[in-house]
Amino acid sequence: MTTGHRQDPARYLAPALPRPVIMDQCWADAVFLHWRIASEVAAPYLPPGVVPDEVDGSSWVGLIGFRMVGAGVGRGLPVPYFGSFPEINVRLYSRGPDGTRGVVFVTLDASRLAVVLAARAAGIPYVWSKCSPIQRGEGARREYGYDVVRYRRQATSRFAVRPDMDRTAEDTLSLELTARFGLHSALAGRTLYIPNAHPPWPLHPATLTEFDDGLLGAAGFRVEGPPESVLFSPGVQTQFGKPGVVYRG
């Protein structure tokens, strides 16, 4: 079964990845929660030269959790310990000067301090936090989620969903919010686009079963009510390619 208006998934395939491959990793047990926001709210968070990418008539803010599994540099072997950890991010949707669509990370919470420090040096706004996956129940009652506690409890988050694994989410909104193949980021007065490629997400609609979040508020977003879009994916294998400069300030 499917949900929403069915779309051709081939429309959302990743473009060819610029070489060389700089990183290979798996994103597993992904939970996607999304709320509508005004574009004028999103715009100040975007790097120079980048504008909000509207989907279904509005901008969106996402709270996304997944398990990073076996990340490695280039096509090399996965890095033990440091290559596997939960990550929870707050993100927006962007369009570059050349029309390329991507995401902008407002915050990314992770438990590996070395990873956090290295990413921040590259302009990616990681935050060192205690992050734990939530998995409970069996069969059709199986739930997935994430628990986050930032250093000195500056912010916390806990959310979980129950996916309907008998249904697939192939509607336009679900695909537009998840089929993103790169990120825009500011570094040293330039705006970079870092491309990635992966197979289409296997997406399933999900029911929100637990939600107590402070990450959106800590990032400056005030959302009301439950997320409009709730999705789950068992995951994809992804690769990152060579970054390119898309805007010089």
Image: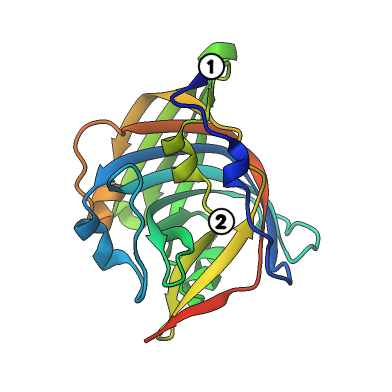
Considering the numbered disc 2 on the image, is that residue within a helix, a strand or a loop?
A: loop
Counting other residues with Cα less than 10 Å from the Cα at mark 2, is it few (<14), some (14-19), or many (20 or more)? many
**Three-letter amino acid code at the position of disc 2:** Phe
Picture quarter containing residue 244?
bottom right
The residue positioned 51% from the left and 70% from the top of the image is 193
Q: Position of residue 165 (x, y in %)?
A: 57, 20
The residue positioned 43% from the left and 51% from the top of the image is 89
The residue positioned 32% from the left and 56% from the top of the image is 152
Q: Position of residue 234 (x, y in %)?
A: 61, 33
* Depth check, front residue: 227 or 139: 227
Quarter of the image where the N terminus is located: top right
Q: If you read the primary sequence from the N terminus, does the residue marked by circle 1 or circle 2 appear first?
A: 1
**Three-letter amino acid code at the position of disc 1:** Gly
In front: mark 1 or mark 2? 2
Residue 93 relative to residue 180: left or right: left
* Depth check, front residue: 115 or 75: 75
Quarter of the image where the C terminus is located: bottom left
Q: Where is mark 1, residue-wise?
A: 137
Q: Is residue 170 visible?
A: yes
Disc marking residue 99: none
Residue 192 relative to residue 249: left or right: right
Q: Where is mark 2, residue-wise?
A: 181
